[in-house]
Image (tube, rainbow, N blue to C red):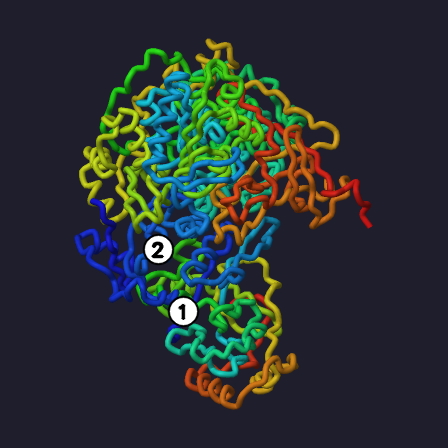
């Protein structure tokens, strides 16, 4: 298995204190009104349950399919979904293409923005801000392919219990794994793809063109996907919130 | 040591870097930083340097690492070596840098120009400000004796300097936040065990939490340890009229009738005593008064308690048996804020007595004694004697077992308003906000108006500062040097922390130490402040070998003192020298030696009981104007049960008018089944008056405006759950709902 940075979340530990949201907001200078991560309230066996989340750095990222310029791509080196701000034209196609609402348009930079697992902090040897600050250590981050890492150990030891939260009609295969029962499960929506992208990805009927696309953008995106070898496979669809 | 350590960050992880740092590799800055004047660095650019500090967004004092780019603090991270917080920083902690860079910060000394609270100010110099304050303090001392000055300081690592000034100036009149919070809880446990215990939640197997809300009112390490222990099998039972997040995450939530916790506790005692579920040998050796208790609770059956508190008798019996089966790794969680009812000391005594029956004192999973931290007192002094001073505090005698060093804010306010037993005409306030945190705001306004001179030192223009004569700007915790502070984190640690400035103080702000020193010098008391904070700290740390080095390299010093079994061969500080189930001193004073239950007041027709509570993103009234936190909690709402709302024709989204015998307020209704039908709730700290709090002035309703001025009979702790309110749709009566 090649390197895949991922997050494993024991949502039963979450107390909804929102430290992760504020830590992320400060670390990444996320503007007022926008967030890169969230906590959703739910219920498990009659008891309150909170589910932390953020960009899921999916195996089959619909945002990558929706991007006309190749600005959004899945990095083969570490498996994260990235945004190259210099290529982003701010068209906004990727925003409804994400079933999780993980993206927003940065009002000042005029580009798409979302969680990058705190790349800048990781380059300094620090944990992502949300993981570092969490009072109950509900979030564990790392390379699930590395058996020596805490994330790899949890990933391996919890096979059969890991839950991916996804929409049945757009299962992007998130790299956000919940350890055992989590809630809520019914919130991811079907990805809304721009029509041209939809045709190209071979997906089922989609909303028609949100933005006109340039041939150059399409080529750039194709090039990026070919290079990364992560062309989404539309055939692989599983049930909502299935157990791996 | 006046500089903060730079911590090298490496790709191999900060932890490793910090470990290396301990061996002396604390060198230099991290990266060839762009000059400060250059374009602001991108959010993911490397941090230039890191420095240890200690959070001040609430009272917990969590260790943190401030990340700095250029001359700006850009991120606050938890100190992973700080065991008390289990290496975390909460939402408020993360928002701390907004306190530092808040555009609403006070910048220079301000002197009131118009009427009190009118908001007309004149900028003056520090010399003018200190000359004026010292002259007024001298004048008040001469006219009304030195006890004519009241000193009130909030929880802060420099508050000790304010108390030092009060003492050498010559006033006994000192209050703090504590008599608006936890003095009755402290009293109840102190008068049972001889000291105020720390709950060892981490090693407990069964916790009954009555009133406390540890997953929102965060206390380190209890909040984190509670979740860790729950993951390991601890059972949590919560009694609360609200389904707080703690109640919602618990194994059981019992929406107890407000004010009846003692009935529940006495019934637990009844079951444990009747069924002999206690450790008889341990009790005989350690506790005094089991026989008296047995007689006292003979008729306090679970059926009796059910009729009072609404929790089924079968559940009470089961919980008592489950607690006893898990004992001594079981507890009734002591909690902190007990400013609820007029018999709150006795309610907390009933909590303490159940703990005594569980035999959990000084044992893993139970209630722990204070551990040795080892800080020394610095620069001891003998305060001058003032012949003309009265004999006692102005609030003395208004409650029989008040803490002498804390008094009672509520009773002190009455003393000021009545001028009895003597006039109190001056007020020095540091970083506390009774205008928002004491019940009955209009009474606090009148207290302000009764004063000849009020000086308030704070970071921002709180409502209390807004009512003062002189407002002095203090720096935030990230800009100042603070003395060392000893902390106990339950079984996690006994530790010492301190603060060095991460960045220089902004504007003209000055730490309160400089202010009290400046006043002392002008009042011919300079000899009592003849040191710097640096020197003071060195004195404090003198007995602790290695502490200075550990503080520099790890940001915290741990004293490896004993955790359990501290009381082996040691007497309790009670009359019997044992755990006093039956308090002999109370009997001597004519107080109930065992807690006697009295049913709570019944609500007037159509009225609802207001209860006070906490939220993990709000600290009392000090964080609402922080833009980062404000985005998540922009204003308070009135929690009301849908059935109660329907009776009042209140629908979701309606704004409602809430009225009590002392005040009124308007806010949005939040219809929720997470509160009892007879109870309503709203957050503290909104509906501010101050024009210096741009985000919360007039926003939401002010809880302090609504709460009646009531107090615990024994300690004078504020009693803030004794107010009934009426609720109606705002504007109702003027227009019919279509």
Nearer to us in this view, B247 or B30: B30
Q: CA distance from mark 2 to mark 1?
A: 29 Å
| Discs 2, 1: same chain | no
Q: State the residue at coordinates (47%, 23%).
A: B408
The residue mark sitting in front, 2 or 1, is 2
Residue B366 seen in the figure: no
Query: Are dots 2 and 1 in contact, CB under 8 Å?
Result: no
Seen in the picture, residue B314 relative to A82 is either above or below; the reply is above
Instruction: Decide if residue B694 is on the left or right side of residue B503.
Output: right
Q: State the residue at coordinates (52%, 72%).
A: A173
Report the number of numbered marks: 2
Seen in the picture, residue B718 relative to B112 is either above or below; the reply is above
Residue A36: image location, x then y, percent: 49, 63
Q: Residue A5, which numbered label?
A: 1
The quadrant of the rendering that contains the N terminus of chain B is top left
Seen in the picture, residue B509 relative to B405 is either above or below; the reply is below
Q: Chain of mark 2?
A: B
Seen in the picture, residue B646 relative to B272 is either above or below; the reply is below
Nearer to us in this view, B578 or A135: A135
Nearer to us in this view, A243 or B264: B264
Instruction: Decide if residue B158 is on the left or right side of residue B706.
Output: left
Residue B535 seen in the figure: yes
Residue B322: image location, x then y, percent: 53, 34
Residue B8: image location, x then y, percent: 24, 59
Which element carries disc 1, helix, strand or loop?
strand
Nearer to us in this view, B632 or B186: B632
When asked about the image quadrant of residue B210, the answer is top right
Residue denoted by label 2: B73
Label 2 crowd (10 A; few <14 / some 14-19 / many >=20): many
Which element carries disc 2, helix, strand or loop?
strand
Q: Chain of mark 1?
A: A
């Amino acid at each position: 298995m090649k390197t895949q940075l991922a997050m494993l979340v024991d949502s039963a530990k979450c107390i909804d204190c929102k430290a992760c949201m504020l830590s992320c907001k400060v670390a990444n200078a996320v503007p007022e009104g926008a967030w890169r991560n969230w906590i959703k309230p739910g219920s498990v066996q009659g008891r309150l349950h909170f589910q932390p989340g953020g960009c899921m750095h999916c195996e089959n990222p619909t945002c990558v399919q929706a991007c006309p310029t190749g600005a959004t791509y899945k990095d083969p080196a570490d498996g994260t979904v990235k945004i190259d701000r210099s290529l982003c034209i701010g068209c906004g196609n990727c925003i409804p293409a994400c079933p999780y609402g993980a993206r927003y348009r940065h009002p000042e930079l005029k580009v798409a923005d979302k969680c990058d697992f705190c790349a800048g902090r990781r380059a300094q040897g620090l944990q992502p801000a949300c993981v570092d600050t969490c009072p109950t250590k509900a979030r564990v981050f790392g390379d699930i392919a590395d058996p020596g890492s805490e994330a790899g150990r949890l990933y391996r030891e919890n096979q059969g219990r890991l839950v991916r939260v996804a929409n049945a009609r757009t299962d992007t295969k998130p790299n956000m794994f919940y350890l055992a029962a989590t809630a809520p499960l019914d919130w991811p929506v079907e990805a809304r793809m721009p029509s041209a992208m939809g045709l190209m990805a071979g997906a089922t009927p989609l909303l028609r063109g949100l933005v006109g696309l340039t041939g150059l953008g399409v080529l750039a995106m194709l090039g990026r996907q070919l290079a990364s070898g992560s062309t989404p496979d539309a055939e692989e669809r599983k049930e909502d919130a299935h157990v791996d | 040591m006046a500089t903060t350590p730079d911590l090298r960050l490496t790709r191999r992880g900060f932890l490793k870097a910090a470990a290396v740092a301990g061996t002396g590799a604390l060198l230099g800055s991290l990266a060839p930083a762009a000059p400060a004047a250059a374009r602001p660095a991108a959010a993911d650019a490397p941090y230039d340097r890191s420095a240890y500090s200690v959070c001040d967004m609430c009272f917990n004092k969590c260790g943190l690492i401030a990340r700095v780019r250029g001359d700006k603090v850009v991120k606050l991270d938890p100190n992973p070596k700080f065991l008390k917080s289990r290496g975390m920083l909460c939402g408020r902690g993360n928002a701390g840098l907004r306190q530092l860079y808040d555009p609403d910060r006070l910048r220079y000394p301000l002197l009131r120009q118009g009427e009190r609270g009118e908001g007309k100010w004149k900028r003056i110099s520090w010399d003018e400000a200190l000359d004026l304050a010292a002259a007024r303090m001298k004048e008040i001392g001469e006219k009304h004796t030195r006890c004519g000055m009241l000193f009130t300081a909030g929880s802060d690592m420099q508050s000790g300097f304010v108390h030092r000034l009060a003492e050498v100036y010559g006033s006994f009149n000192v209050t703090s936040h504590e008599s608006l919070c936890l003095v009755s809880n402290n009293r109840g446990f102190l008068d049972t065990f001889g000291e105020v215990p720390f709950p060892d939640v981490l090693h407990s197997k069964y916790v009954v939490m009555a009133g406390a809300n540890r997953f929102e009112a965060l206390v380190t390490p209890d909040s984190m340890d509670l979740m860790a222990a729950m993951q390991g099998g601890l059972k949590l039972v919560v009694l609360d009229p609200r389904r707080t997040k703690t109640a919602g995450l618990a194994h059981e939530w019992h929406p107890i009738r407000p004010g009846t916790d003692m009935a529940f506790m006495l019934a637990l005692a009844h079951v444990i005593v009747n069924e002999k579920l206690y450790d008889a040998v341990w009790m005989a050796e350690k506790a005094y008064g089991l026989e008296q208790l047995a007689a006292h609770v003979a008729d306090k059956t679970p059926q009796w308690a059910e009729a009072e508190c609404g929790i089924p008798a079968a559940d009470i019996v089961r919980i008592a048996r489950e607690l006893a089966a898990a004992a001594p790794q079981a507890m009734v969680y002591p909690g902190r804020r007990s400013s609820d009812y007029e018999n709150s000391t006795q309610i907390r005594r009933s909590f303490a007595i159940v703990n005594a029956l569980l035999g959990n004192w000084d044992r893993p999973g139970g209630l722990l004694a204070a551990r040795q931290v080892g800080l020394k007192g610095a620069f001891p002094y003998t305060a001058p004697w003032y012949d003309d001073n009265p004999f006692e505090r102005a609030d003395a005698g208004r409650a029989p077992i008040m803490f002498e060093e804390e008094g009672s804010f509520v009773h002190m306010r009455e003393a000021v308003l009545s001028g009895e037993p003597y006039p109190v005409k001056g007020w020095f306030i540091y970083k506390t906000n009774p205008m928002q945190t004491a019940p009955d705001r209009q009474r606090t306004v009148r207290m302000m108006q009764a004063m000849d001179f009020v000086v308030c030192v704070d970071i921002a223009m709180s409502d209390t500062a807004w009512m003062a004569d002189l407002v002095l700007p203090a720096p935030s915790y990230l800009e100042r040097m603070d003395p060392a502070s000893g902390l106990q984190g339950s079984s996690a640690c006994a530790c010492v922390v301190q603060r060095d400035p991460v960045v220089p103080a902004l504007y003209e702000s000055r730490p309160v130490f400089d202010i009290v020193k400046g006043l002392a010098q002008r009042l011919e008391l300079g000899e009592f402040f003849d040191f710097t904070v640096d020197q003071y700290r060195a004195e404090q740390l003198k007995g602790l070998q290695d502490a200075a080095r550990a503080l520099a390299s790890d940001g915290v010093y741990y004293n490896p003192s004993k955790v359990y079994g501290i009381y082996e061969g040691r007497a309790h500080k009670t009359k019997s020298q044992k755990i006093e189930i039956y308090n002999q001193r109370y009997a001597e004073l004519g107080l109930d030696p065992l807690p006697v239950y009295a049913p709570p007041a019944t609500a007037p027709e159509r009225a609802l009981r207001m209860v006070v509570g906490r939220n993990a993103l709000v600290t009392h009234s000090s964080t609402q104007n922080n833009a980062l936190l404000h985005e998540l909690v922009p204003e308070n709402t009135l929690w009301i049960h849908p059935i109660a709302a329907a009776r009042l024709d209140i629908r979701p989204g309606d704004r409602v008018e809430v009225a009590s015998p002392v005040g009124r307020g308007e806010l949005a209704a939040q219809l929720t089944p997470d509160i009892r039908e007879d109870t309503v709730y709203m957050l503290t700290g909104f509906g501010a008056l101050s024009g210096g709090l741009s985000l919360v002035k007039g926003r939401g309703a002010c809880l302090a405006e609504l709460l009646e001025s009531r107090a615990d009979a024994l300690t004078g702790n504020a009693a803030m759950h004794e107010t009934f309110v009426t609720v109606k749709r705002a504007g109702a009566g003027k227009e019919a709902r279509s």
